[in-house]
């Protein structure tokens, strides 16, 4: 059984107003569930053993951000095919807004029409055979 970790952005904004999957117990106030992931076993094995009490989908806290964990490949496939545009977004950082012209830098911009346009421009210019 494998655990798939999904971006913290899923639980922000309009989505957070709806029902949220259950959170795993034992989160520390500042670091969240990071001590759970530190051990002799690899994190995906640890997260694969957690759903025995919570079901196939649950949340954990990594620092102050919530992250969605799915433990079945069917749910992971649904997240990355059916709902891929919801999961493709990036979290908003204050530093990216202040230093990056309101998150307009290519690496920090959220997934929207501007990001797609910048990607179409950047890929041929930066990764062409002439540049490499």
Image (tube, helix red, strand yellow):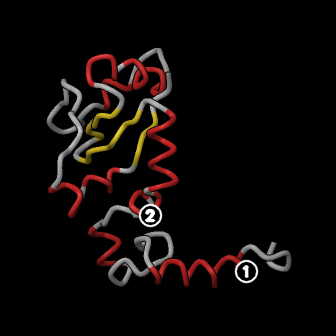
Q: Which residue in the structure is indicated by mark 2? A: 85
| Horizontal arrangement in the rendering, residue 85 relative to residue 9 (left or right) | right
Q: Residue at x 41, y 57 (%)?
A: 87
Task: Pick whichever, 68 or 100, lies toward us.
Answer: 68
Q: Nearer the viewer, mark 1 or mark 2?
A: 2
Task: Pick whichever, 56 or 13, lies toward us.
Answer: 56
Residue 47, image quadrant: top left
Q: Determine which of the numbered discs, if any, sits on residue 102 in the image.
A: none
Bin the neighbour count of mark 1 within 10 Å (Cα to Cα): few under 14, some 14-19, many 20 and up: few
**3D distance between C-alphas at marks 1 and 2:** 23 Å
Q: Would you place residue 44 above or below residue 5 in this image?
A: above
Q: Which residue in the structure is indicated by mark 1? A: 124
Q: Would you place residue 76 above or below residue 92 in this image?
A: above
Decide which of tag 1 and tag 2 comes sooner along the chain: 2
Residue 14, image x and y in percent?
Answer: 21, 63
Q: Would you place residue 52 above or below residue 117 in this image?
A: above
Q: Quadrant of the C terminus?
A: bottom right
């Amino acid at each position: 059984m494998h655990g798939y970790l999904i971006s913290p952005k899923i639980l922000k904004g309009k989505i957070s107003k709806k029902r949220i999957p259950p959170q795993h117990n034992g989160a520390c106030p500042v670091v969240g569930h990071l001590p759970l992931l530190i051990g002799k076993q690899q994190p995906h094995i640890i997260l694969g053993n957690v759903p025995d009490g919570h079901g196939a989908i649950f949340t954990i806290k990594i620092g102050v951000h919530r992250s969605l964990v799915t433990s079945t490949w069917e749910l992971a496939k649904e997240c990355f095919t059916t709902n891929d545009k919801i999961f493709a977004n990036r979290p908003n950082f204050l530093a990216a807004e202040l230093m990056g012209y309101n998150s307009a830098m290519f690496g920090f911009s959220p997934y929207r029409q501007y990001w797609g346009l910048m990607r179409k421009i950047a890929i041929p210019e930066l990764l062409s055979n002439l540049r490499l």
